Image: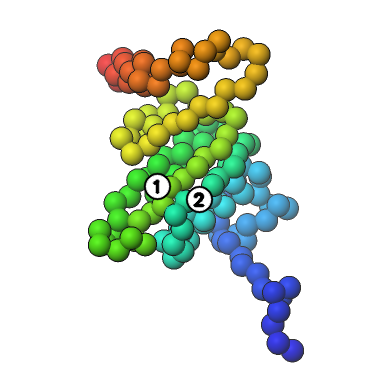
Amino acid sequence: MLPTFLTYSTDVLTCCRQFLQVLSAQVHSGGERSVSTIMYLMAMQSMMVSPFRCVDEINQGLDERNERLVFRRIVDNSTMPPENKNDPSSHCGQYFLITPKLLPNLTDMENENVTVHCIFNGPYNFKNFGDWNVDTYLDSKRTLTRELRH
């Protein structure tokens, strides 16, 4: 019998506890599956050229430690310099991280190659879009980070 798409599968081995196991909903928590899945996808991205990648709510269900780990890895992956500057397909591509929330004090957003777009929707937003100033926001976060380090 010839293989068909119905018979194809990929087993992702992960070590969330003490030994390697096949990633599954029966054994692993939602957070463990999310972290393992995003790490697997980012490991695979060097094999697939794409101008951009969209990640929707990958941080939902993650504890603070894992959310910071995943965000740092996304920033590292999406800001890597191209392997070959003369080859347009050797770039890492852009990431669109779509999420209703981000943890406070994510220092990785200070990378000059990271752009944050905040889409506000709801009754408690600014009266005018010009009231939101990203530079002021980032300056306050940098100041807070410096103060916390000392």
Amino acid type at circle 2 is Arg
| Chain-order first, disc 1 or disc 2 | 2
Q: Total marks drawn?
A: 2
Give x and y (percent) for residue 103: 50, 27
Look at the numbered discs 1 and 2 and tell me whether their residues touch, using CB distance below 8 Å: yes
- 144 relative to 25 in the view: left or right: left
User: On the image, numbered disc 1 is attached to which residue?
Assistant: 78
Does any portion of residue 18 appear in the rendered image? no
Q: Looking at the image, which residue is at 71% across and 87% down?
A: 2
**As rendered, which of 59 and 88 lies closer to the eye?**
88
Residue 100: where, in percent of width, then height?
Answer: 60, 30
Q: Residues within 10 Å of mark 1 (few under 14, many from 20)?
A: many
Q: CA distance from mark 1 to mark 2?
A: 9 Å
Asked whether 117 or 73 is in front, the reply is 117
Residue drawn at (30%, 63%) of the image: 87
Q: Quadrant of residue 139?
A: top left
The type of residue carrying mark 1 is Ser
Q: Quadrant of residue 55?
A: top right
Question: Label 2, on which residue?
Answer: 53
Which quadrant of the figure contains the C terminus? top left
**Image point 47% across, 23% down: which residue?**
104
Residue 99: image tag: none
**Mark 2: which secondary structure?**
strand
Residue 61 to residue 17: above or below? above
Q: Secondary structure at mark 1?
A: helix
Which residue: 51% across, 27% down? 118
Quarter of the picture holding the N terminus: bottom right
The foreground one among 29 and 55 is 55
Residue 12 picture location, percent across and down: 58, 61
Task: Say if 36 sits above or below 106 in the image.
Answer: below
Apparent side of residue 147 relative to residue 133 in the rendered image (left or right): left
Q: For residue 68, say whether it is visible.
A: yes
